[in-house]
Image (spheres, coloured by chain):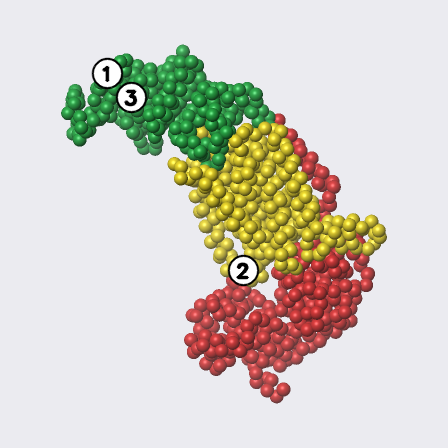
């Protein structure tokens, strides 16, 4: 917090966080609608021809799902960190630049057009949501640049405009859709974690981790950017390059998260704040720790979502909102006191 | 040696011509005060000199090389800029803030080197800010914060320092403290200081050279004693100014019609009413 | 700059490792998928599938159904594996099924998703009802018959349904088509359009949808369009939730505004229990008959 970050401190903090993550993953994989225990999971050694449902559930249902929750949680948290830094706005979250309506539009187009070809084992909804999300963010970037380079206000305004426009289109398409299609769209967008093929998860994890490492590489520049693009440039930082990389990576990992699991809110907003409050705003530490904390948070939230009203499932976005809301309020109060907003 | 050379510099924001054909040269190790009424283009000049803005025409040379030939990083090794103090949105501490000046020198993984730490520690000592190194920037007073930003500029270890109104909104103690710091940097480290200021008296006391710019793009450049005279100041600022001598420098006090001592002002020039 | 190349190299290695370690093509693996195995543990994830399974005589072999499978009554006693919108995959796996029957894409993507996942894990899953045409019903019955080796019973069921439908068809053949509006919602006023399977049932029942072709399947219509379509009969389903009587009472007040529509003038507004109408199952003929009774009550006067 007050002292400079050193390599050794960072290494130990990340290691400790990873250990906590492993523990959480293990515990959550043993919780679910069906009671299973580690012993029964590994008792399959016996007859190869019988089905061990505990093993099936553990390996094929729970672990992939938890893996997915970790990827999405990490991606959303890091994306939140980046947008807060670039836009210099503590209330920024991954969806602030219109991604949510872009993904929604992609989703509803996929559902309405009734495409039935699964791509790579995925329904086309996910692919279209991805294209929608990442296309929108580039549209916003492009429009924002017309307002002038490094102009934060331009980006925000472009985001608002694009959001409004796409939301209108979504409303129109919703009105001509069949009720099941509407339900399918809304349910998908509400944010849900369900199982994907391991291969897809592996690719997504690879992209997300690569993105987080890339963001770590530009962390010192992100630190400087927090003082404004002009200040950063005077200190010798190539602000255009930094903003472009940050923006591109954040767009990519957010779109992956949305494509895998719909729109899950609050993770990208409160995890960066929580980590910042405890560990300070230095992005070299904030990014990796936010990623791990995001993974832990979403895994726990998802476990709650699938057990609290079993056998039905709450959309995980509901749990993150209920948990996130009051926590965010608490953070806000502490935060404003810390900044001393009574000060000039 | 001329560390900064400006020839026929012109710049306009869309329709408004802010600077027209300004030329001047700054020798290394001088303290230049840039003064003038609002809208004269002082901040614009600072932004042009730090390559934040691109000029319309003319030449700017830094250390005898055209400014366009410098990359952002290279220019940051020649010029450091201090603007008005602000509180960042996120809670960085003083030492983290100052260390940011060394970002371009960090190692592969993005951590500071031993040299960086030494330079930062020295800067903190010189500006007497090391006692609040671990504190959050937001917990300091404005004056203290501004000193931190100057410390950061020192930590950049550049021969040139540009400042845009570094002491507006600060009280006497902090104003003087900062100008003393700058003068010390000039004397002890041969730094070249360009400071935009509204305070003519401080400029008169601390600067060697002055650049007085007017809103109509007129300007005067030369030693402070020549440029900052009652006649020129009254002309450029379009106000009556009372002058008195104090030792080596002069003292200037603008007096309006209803000021107590309005009658004391000698009218040397024609007035436009 | 070097660190970026390292990152790229590491990422490429990761992707290549992924291709070599994991199967990126769907399905395969282990245990449960044995084609000629006796199907003894069946899971159904939709109420109409449950009805078909019961009708084909598979009651004892059904291991689990969703919570909304309420017909026939004994279905409610089966193990609950979630609901129609969210079947619980853990409960399904725990029930050790050897056949899982679900609805399909594009109508029900989440159910198709479930079926695909189960197939990937090696479970035997069958999807039926990819669209909502009456032909899908026969298709589903046939597929279920083949999968459970009950082709005989399946064909009998299909024939029985067809025969009942033909009977109704015979009754209403050559008769004048009655204009009918199927009102699914009052505020705002929404009706079943031409591109729905309710429309198909209306036509089988000897009626004609009073509303013309629309973009939306269940379009909201204005009062003006309501009056213009000049419908002879209005049918309102209870949607399983509302009390039929309540709906009738509030209907009197609601429809009195449109005194000049033939349906209101001649008091031909019918509230019907809709569970046989709104889903495509073995009770289709009863659903069609219910509609026919509303459209042409005179055809049934000589019967009970």
Q: Which residue is mark 1?
A: B245
List x then y, in percent, for residue A161: 44, 47
Q: Tell which tag, 2 or 3, sits nearer the viewer.
A: 3
For chain A, what colour was chosen? yellow
Mark 2 and mark 3 residues within 8 Å of each other at the beta carbon = no
Relative to A313, is B225 on the left or the right?
left
Name the residue tied to disc 3: B201
Picture coordinates of residue C108, whole percent (x, y): 63, 60
Q: Say if C198 sits above or below A281 in the image.
A: below
Is C106 situated left or right of B10 in this image? Answer: right
SS type, badge 2: loop
Q: Position of residue B203 (x, y in %)?
A: 31, 20
Regarding mark 1 in the picture, which secondary structure is present there? strand
The part of the image, by quadrant, that contains residue B266 is top left
Q: Look at the numbered discs 3 and 1 and tell me whether their residues touch, using CB distance below 8 Å.
A: no
In the rendered structure, the colour chosen for chain C is red
Q: CA distance from mark 3 to mark 1?
A: 11 Å
Task: Please give the name of the residue rendered at 40% of the width and 11% of the height, measured from the top-left corner.
Answer: B1
* Residue C75, label in figure: none
């Amino acid at each position: 917090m007050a002292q400079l970050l050193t390599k050794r401190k960072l290494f130990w903090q990340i290691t400790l966080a990873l250990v906590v993550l492993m523990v959480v993953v293990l515990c959550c994989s043993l919780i679910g609608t069906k009671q299973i225990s580690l012993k029964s999971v590994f008792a399959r050694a016996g007859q190869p021809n019988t089905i061990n449902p505990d093993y099936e559930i553990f390996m094929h249902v729970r672990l992939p799902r938890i893996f997915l929750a970790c990827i999405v949680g990490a991606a959303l948290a890091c994306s939140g960190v980046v947008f807060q830094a670039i836009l210099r706005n503590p209330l920024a979250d991954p969806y602030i630049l219109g991604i949510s309506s872009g993904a929604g539009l992609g989703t509803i187009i996929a559902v309405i057009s009734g495409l039935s070809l699964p791509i790579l084992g995925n329904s086309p909804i996910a692919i279209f949501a991805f294209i929608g999300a990442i296309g929108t963010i580039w549209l916003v970037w492009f429009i924002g640049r017309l307002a002038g380079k490094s102009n934060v206000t331009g980006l925000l305004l472009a985001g608002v405009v694009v959001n409004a426009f796409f939301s209108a289109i979504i409303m129109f398409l919703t009105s001509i859709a069949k009720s099941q299609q509407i339900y399918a769209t809304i349910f998908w967008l509400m944010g849900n974690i369900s199982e994907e093929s391991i291969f897809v998860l592996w690719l997504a994890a690879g992209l997300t981790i690569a993105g987080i490492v890339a963001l770590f590489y530009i962390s010192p520049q992100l630190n400087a950017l927090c003082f404004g693009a002009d200040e950063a440039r005077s200190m010798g930082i190539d602000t255009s390059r930094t903003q472009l990389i940050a923006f591109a990576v954040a767009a990519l990992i957010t779109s992956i998260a949305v494509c895998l699991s719909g729109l899950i809110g609050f993770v990208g907003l409160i995890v960066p704040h929580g980590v910042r409050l405890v560990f300070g705003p230095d992005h070299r530490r904030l990014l990796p720790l936010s990623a791990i904390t995001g993974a832990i948070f979403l895994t726990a939230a998802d476990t709650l979502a699938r057990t609290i009203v079993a056998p039905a499932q709450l959309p995980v976005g509901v749990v993150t909102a209920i948990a996130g809301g009051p926590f965010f309020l608490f953070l806000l109060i502490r935060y404003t006191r810390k900044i001393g907003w009574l000060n000039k | 040696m001329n560390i900064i050379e400006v020839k026929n510099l012109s710049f306009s924001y869309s329709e408004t011509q802010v600077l027209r054909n300004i030329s001047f040269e700054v020798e290394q190790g001088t303290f230049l005060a840039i003064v003038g009424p609002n809208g004269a283009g002082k901040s614009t000049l600072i932004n042009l000199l730090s390559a934040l803005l691109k000029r319309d025409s003319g030449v700017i040379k830094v250390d005898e090389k055209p400014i366009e030939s410098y990359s952002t990083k290279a220019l940051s090794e020649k010029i450091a800029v201090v603007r008005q103090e602000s509180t960042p949105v996120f809670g960085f501490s003083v030492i983290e803030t100052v260390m940011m000046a060394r970002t371009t020198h960090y190692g592969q993984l993005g951590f500071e080197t031993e040299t960086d730490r030494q330079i930062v520690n020295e800067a903190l000592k010189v500006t007497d800010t090391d006692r609040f190194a671990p504190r959050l920037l937001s917990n300091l007073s404005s004056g203290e914060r501004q000193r931190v930003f100057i410390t950061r500029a020192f930590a950049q270890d550049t021969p040139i320092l540009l400042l845009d109104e570094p002491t507006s909104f600060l009280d006497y103690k902090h104003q003087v403290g900062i100008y003393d710091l700058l003068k010390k940097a000039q004397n002890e480290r041969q730094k070249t200081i360009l400071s935009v200021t509204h305070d003519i008296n401080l400029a008169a006391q601390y600067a060697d050279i002055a650049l007085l710019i007017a809103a109509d793009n007129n300007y005067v450049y030369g030693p402070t004693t020549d440029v900052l005279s009652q006649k020129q100041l009254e002309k450029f600022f379009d106000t009556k100014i009372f002058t008195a001598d104090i030792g080596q420098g002069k003292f200037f006090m603008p007096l309006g019609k209803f000021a107590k001592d309005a009658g004391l002002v000698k009218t040397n020039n024609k007035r436009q009413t | 700059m070097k660190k970026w190349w390292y990152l790229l190299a590491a990422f490429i290695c990761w992707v290549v490792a992924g291709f070599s370690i994991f199967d990126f093509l769907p399905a395969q693996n282990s245990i449960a998928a044995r084609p000629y195995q006796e199907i003894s543990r069946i899971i159904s994830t939709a109420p109409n599938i449950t009805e078909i399974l019961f009708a084909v005589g598979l009651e004892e072999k059904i291991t689990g159904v969703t919570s909304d499978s309420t017909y026939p009554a004994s279905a409610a006693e089966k193990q609950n594996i979630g609901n129609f919108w969210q079947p619980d995959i853990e409960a399904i796996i725990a029930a050790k099924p050897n056949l899982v029957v679900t609805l399909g894409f594009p109508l029900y993507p989440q159910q198709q998703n479930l079926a695909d996942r189960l197939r990937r894990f090696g479970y035997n899953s069958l999807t039926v009802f990819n669209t909502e045409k009456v032909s899908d019903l026969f298709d589903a019955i046939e597929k279920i018959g083949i999968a459970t080796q009950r082709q005989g019973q399946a064909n009998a069921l299909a024939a029985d349904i067809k025969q009942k439908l033909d009977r109704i068809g015979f009754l209403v053949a050559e008769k004048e088509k009655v204009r009918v509006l199927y009102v699914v919602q009052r505020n705002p006023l929404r009706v079943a359009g031409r591109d729905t399977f309710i429309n198909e049932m209306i036509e089988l029942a000897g009626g004609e949808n009073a509303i013309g072709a629309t973009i939306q399947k269940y379009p909201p219509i204005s009062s003006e369009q309501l009056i213009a379509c000049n419908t002879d009969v209005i049918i309102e389903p209870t949607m399983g939730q509302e009390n039929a009587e309540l709906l009738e009472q509030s209907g009197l007040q609601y429809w009195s505004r449109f005194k000049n529509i033939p349906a209101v003038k001649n008091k031909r507004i019918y509230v019907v229990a809709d569970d046989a109408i709104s889903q495509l199952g073995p009770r289709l003929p009863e659903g069609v008959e219910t509609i026919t009774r509303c459209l042409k009550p005179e055809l049934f006067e000589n019967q009970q």
